[in-house]
Amino acid sequence: MVYPGAVHSRFEHSLGVYWLAGEAVQMLKKYQGLELGIDNFDIQTVKLAGLLHDVGHGPFSHLFQSEFLPQVMNDTKWSHEQMSTKMVDHIVDKHNIDIDSEMMRKVKEMILASSGSAPKHDVSEKRFLYDIVANGRNGIDVDKFDYIVRDSRACGLGCSFEFQRLMETMRVMGDEICYRAKEHRTVHKLFATRADLYRTVYVHPKVKAIELMVVDALVEANDYLQISSYIEDPSEYWKLDDSIIKTIETAPDQQLRESRNLILRIRTRNLYQFCNEYTVPRDKIENFKDVTAQDIVCSQQNGGVLLKEEDVAVSNVRIDLTHGRRNPLERINFFKDYESEEKFSIPDDRISHLLPTCFQDMIVRVYSKKPELVGAISEAFENFQLKTYGIKAQVHATPEKKKRRI
């Protein structure tokens, strides 16, 4: 709805990761196959992990996991990576697929490799293979190679990051994929391009407004449709996809009226109104706590409209270079040339003095669910900033024309 060309599906992405995973492991086999003992079993395993790594995503992907489920379930540890492994087992069992059990075990471990539930590996297990699809060690993986280039192209954005250079020059040293030292800027460009995509596309203010509305629609419909219960059973979960919105939209049930109204607002572009945003001061990021609608409402001064929490939506947006507040380059090992046997990290000051000294942005955005409340909510948001930081941290005031729009 914001980038109309971005109609590519997660299935296309999965095919891309499948292909790139195969290319990456074939590249390692070409240069180090005998040394590393890479065989067809390894190649097939890595490719399958690439194909299936996202099969556990719910409707609207990360929105389902990070925004919807926390609102309807208490203390859920659910993740799409864990669900992917359950879906893989379900697919194999349901369709009686004849596949080696050891291969299946490794495929599932590779899917979990970058998540909090990643398994521990034995030294003998070719640990480097687990860094190809979802790299929990340093964040460089073919999953990013695919979506960064694919999303940039689909959204009409330029992309100067060349993953081919990394794939052609990577080598395994000490059971870890390392990169040629002269490619350190290409590595940094990977993380910088990803962060730019987040800011420009994934957390675009209008994108977030629509996401907030989709989440509210799903939460409203959850009691009646029992959407969250689908995660408990893979044989039911596969039925749950983006079409849930169409189900709500076309259902005559009175219990879904509020959800239907929200979806109608999205269709007619009557969105939650973006009021304003500010970037959290650098020295406040470490101890930052998410801002809530209650924080904004409690900052309202006496007089005028009386705001309620249900009038306000707050989006706390984190954008980083994959390693939180830390420099992602500190986790990556390089080598000098193809004859060298030593791996090493490269300090920031040896790369460039133009690189950032802070590696995370924290942005607080506030939306009004009703157009006529933009002015009152914007004023309360400014009061919150003054109360919290002693200054108005936002770049500019909310335009008067926007405040008056009804």
Image (cartoon, rainbow, N blue to C red):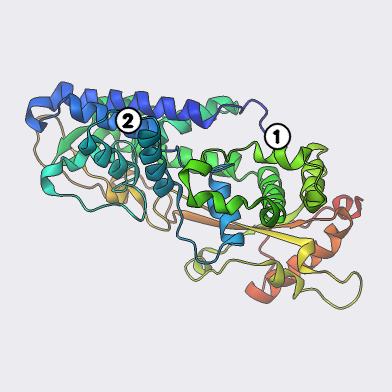
The x and y percentages for residue 65 are 53, 51
Q: Nearer the viewer, residue 268 or 142?
A: 268
Q: CA distance from mark 2 to mark 1?
A: 32 Å
Compared to residue 181, the image places residue 355 above or below, namely below
Q: Neighbour class for label 1 at 10 Å: few (<14), some, many (≥20)?
A: few
Name the residue tied to disc 1.
Answer: 1
What residue do we see at 68% from left, 28% from top? 4
Which-is-in-front pick, marks 2 and 1? 2
Q: Which amino acid, by three-letter code, is at mark 1?
A: Met
Residue 180 visible somewhere in the drawing: no
User: Left or right: where does residue 174 sit relative to residue 132?
Assistant: left
Dot 2 falls on a residue whose secondary structure is helix
Q: How many marks?
A: 2
Is residue 299 or residue 9 the one in the foreground? 9
Quadrant showing the N terminus: top right
**The one of 243 and 176 positioned closer to us in this rendering:** 243
Is residue 24 left or right of 36 when viewed as pictured?
right
Check disc 2 and report the residue beneath it. Answer: 48
Secondary structure, mark 1, is loop
- Quarter occupied by residue 295: bottom right
Which mark, by number, is residue 142? none
- Badge 2, how many Cα within 10 Å: few under 14, some, many 20+? many
284 relative to 248, above or below: below
Task: Point out residue 94 in the picture as x, y percentages from the top left corner.
Answer: 40, 34
Q: Is residue 162 left or right of residue 316?
A: left
Say whether marks 2 and 1 touch (CB < 8 Å). Answer: no
Quadrant location of residue 52?
top left
Residue at image point 39% right, 45% down:
86
2 or 1: tag closer to the N-terminus: 1
Where does residue 133 sit, x and y in percent of width and height? 33, 36
